[in-house]
Image: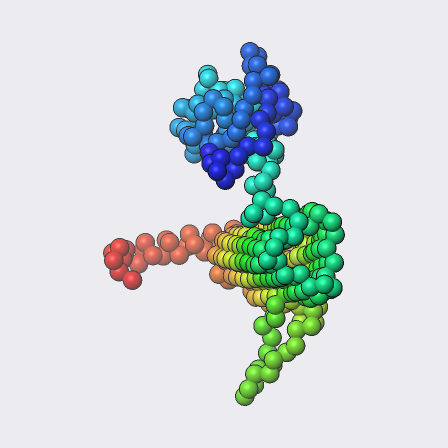
Amino acid sequence: MSDPIFFAAATDLTLAEIAVVAGASLPDGADPQARLAGAASLEGAGPEHLAYMDNARYGDAFAVTRAGACLVSPRFAARCPSGTVALVSREPYRAYATLLGRLHPDALRPGSQFGARGIAPGAHIHPEAHLEDGVTVDPGAVIGPGAEIGAGTVIGPNAVIGPGVRIGRDCAIGPGTTLSHALLGNRVILHPGARLGQDGFGFAMGATHLKVPQIGRVIVQDDVEIGANTTIDRGASRDTVIGEGTKIDNLVQIAHNVVIGRHCVIVSGVGISGSTTLEDYVVLGGQVGVVGHLRIGRGAQIAGSSNVNRDVPPGSRWGGTPAKPVRAWFRELTTLARLAERSGKAPADDEG
């Protein structure tokens, strides 16, 4: 349930409006003009709230929910409590996300910490920077010479936008972020503490390690979202590229010369070494490590905590250390478990 101190609802919605967005039909007897003022979990919802149900693990909470309406997948529709309007949707979670965005649009991206518009006192903007009309800059932000920022973009407090950096329209640059040697498209979201464009880690190793100048850029295409404290190094010999619509979680490290395709999903704790390419729609689970100079094919999925040390074919599902096709990985795990059983007494819980 949202706290109105942080997320006051921007509007309320009728059941008829909710049904249209969800692609659902209202059940017999439901009042199409009944209004819902917010959204909440199954456990926390009251008659004024919208909830959703799409996972059997939450069956007990669903059975006793007091939500005014609930988006449900067809397999759960018959189990909806009598006091809750069941709105049957093929994709209840996606429909819920869309409706939540209408109720709480301010939760979709970082906004001004002062709730203000325009250039705040205490912002430091070089006279040779170019800001279109409608840019918001919070106190403490620094914008260097030659930087260009598009209309509707918000620059959070203490963000640093380096010389020549270009940021498109309707972007959100969170507090404390730093950008250098970077070009960003439209509707890009950077959460607090993200770092883009710093040196890649490149040294010619020997008796002494000679630093390799990193002369590339970071290119971030439209509709990319990058989580808090994620770091993306600029390229050395080619640009580091984040493709359109890709979503990157918190605490991810992306090294120099990495090229990530369109609509990829990269979960927290991932590290991608230099000059690796991810094709479109790749998914990397949490804490995946990828060595350098590889190619992961379109639509491939890598299980969490895996280590990828060779190319991955398109559309495949891999896991393990070193990563391999999931069937082979599961066979290895099963075989190892059987060998452990046959070897005798299992180790005690307190044994190493």
| Residue under the image location 46 percent in, 34 percent down | 1
Q: Is residue 59 above or below residue 174?
A: above
Residue farthest to the front, as pictured: 121
Q: How many marks?
A: 0
As rendered, which of 205 and 251 lies closer to the eye? 251
Relative to the observer, which residue lies in front, 316 or 189?
A: 189
- When asked about the image quadrant of residue 144, the answer is bottom right
Name, please, the residue furthest toward the bottom. Answer: 207
Q: Residue furthest top?
A: 29
Image location of residue 278, percent across then percent down: 64, 57
Residue 46 in the figure: left or right of residue 352: right
Does any portion of residue 325 appear in the rendered image? no
Percent x, y for residue 311?
A: 62, 61
Horizontal side, residue 174 vs residue 126: left or right:
left
Residues 223 and 152: in front is: 152
Q: Position of residue 232 (x, y in %)?
A: 60, 62
Q: Examine the rendered structure and indicate whether residue 265 appears above or below residue 238.
A: above
| Colour pattern of the rendering | rainbow
Residue drawn at point x = 55 percent, y = 32 percent: 9
Looking at the image, which is closer to me, 36 or 227?
A: 36
The structure residue drawn at horizontal position 37% and vertical position 54%, both measured from the top left corner, is 337
Q: Residue at x 45, y 24 (%)?
A: 46
For residue 13, say whether it is visible.
Answer: yes
- Looking at the picture, how far across and down is residue 216, in whole percent? 69, 69
Q: Which image quarter: residue 30?
A: top right
Name the quadrant of the C terminus: bottom left
